Amino acid sequence: MYQKKRTSPFTIFFRILFTACLIYSVVFIFQNSLQIAEQSSLRSEQVQQVVNEVAGTVGLGPFSLHVIRKMAHFTEFMMMGFWFMLCLRVYTRHFIKHVSWPLFLGLGTAVTDETIQIFVDGRGSSVKDVWIDFAGFLVGLFVALLILMFCRMCVILFVHRHDDRELMEPEPQPRPAKKRPAPSPAPQPQEEWDEEPEEEWEEEPQPQYQPPARPARQAARRVPEPQPQWEPVVPQQKEEEEESYDTSIEIEY
C-alpha cells in the first residue's frame, strides 16, 4: 500500500509563518482602505515627515503628500507579493508552474481595495492606483523569487562542495585480496579389511629368444663379362671402303 511521505516540522513551521504574514498584509491593506479621508491624511502626513527626514540624510529632496500616498500603496502590495511567493513555495515545489495563482489574486486584491474606497467618506478609486498596486505586487513576487533562487544555489553548492576534489584525486583502489590456499580435505577413515594369506604362485620358465637362421652366402660371385673395345678408324681405310663400295655397285649395274 502506498504510504504518504511525512511532512517535516520545519516545513509546517514555515507554512504557518508565511500564511500568517500573507493574511496580515491583506488585512492591513483593507484596513487602510476602510479609513475615512481625515484619518488617512493624518497618517500620510506622519509618514511623510519620517520619510523626508530619512531622505534628507541621504541627500534626497522632500516628497509631497501625493507621492507618499502612492508609495504607500506600492509598498503595501509589494509586501503582499513577497509573502505570497514564499507561501506558495512552502506548499509546492513547482511554484513557478503555479505562478498564475498569485498574479490573479494580486490583481483581484488591488481591484477590491480600490472598490472599497468608493464606499468610504472622502475617498475615491482610480484605475491608476490599481496599476500601481499591481506593479508593487509584481515587484514583491520578483524579489521573493530571486531570494529563493539564491538560497537554492547555495544549497546545491554546499551539497556538491567535494565533487571537484573527487575529480582531481583518484579514488583509492581496494587492495587485491590474498588468495588463501584451498583447505586440504580431511583424511577419511580407511576401512579395515580382514587380511587373507597371500597365495604363492610359481612362475613358468620363459623360452630364450633365438634369432632366425640366415641363408648361406654364395661362395663365388658372378664375374662381369668383358665389354667390347672400340678402335678409331683410320681415314685412309675409310676412303678405300667407300671406293670399293661404289665399284661394286657399278659392276652390278
Image (cartoon, rainbow, N blue to C red):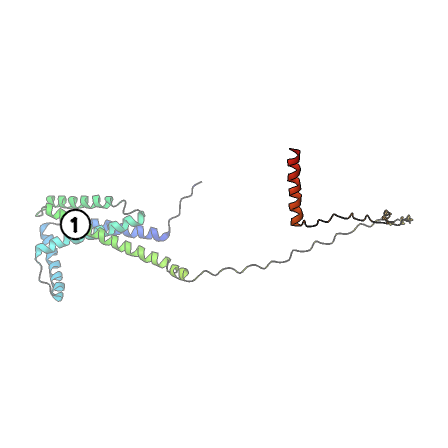
Where residue 161 appears, as percent x and y from the top left, is: 37, 60
Q: Nearer the viewer, residue 128 or 45?
A: 128
Image quadrant for the C terminus?
Answer: top right
Helix, strand or loop at disc 1? helix
Q: Tell me the residue at 15%/44% (across/down).
A: 111
Q: Tell me the residue at 14%/47% (across/down).
A: 131
Q: Tell me the residue at 66%/34% (across/down).
A: 252
Q: Name the residue furthest bottom.
A: 57
Where residue 139 appears, as percent x and y from the top left, is: 19, 52
Q: Nearer the viewer, residue 173 or 84?
A: 173
Q: Is residue 34 visible?
A: no
Q: Is residue 118 visible?
A: yes
Task: From this view, report whether residue 249 is shown above or below residue 84.
Answer: above
Please indicate whether residue 38 sits to the left or right of residue 92 in the image.
left
Q: Name the residue furthest front.
A: 251
Where residue 210 appears, as percent x and y from the top left, is: 87, 49
Please indicate whether residue 113 sits to the left or right of residue 185 in the image.
left
Q: Nearer the viewer, residue 250 or 5?
A: 250
Categorize mark 1 by other alpha carbons within 10 Å: few (<14), some (14-19), many (20+): many
Q: Nearer the viewer, residue 224 or 249?
A: 249
Q: Name the residue furthest top.
A: 253
Image quadrant for the N terminus?
Answer: top left
Figure label count: 1
- Residue named by callout 1: 135
Q: Amino acid type of disc 1?
A: Ala
Please indicate whether residue 132 sits to the left or right of residue 155 in the image.
left
Classify residue 167 by image quadrant.
bottom left
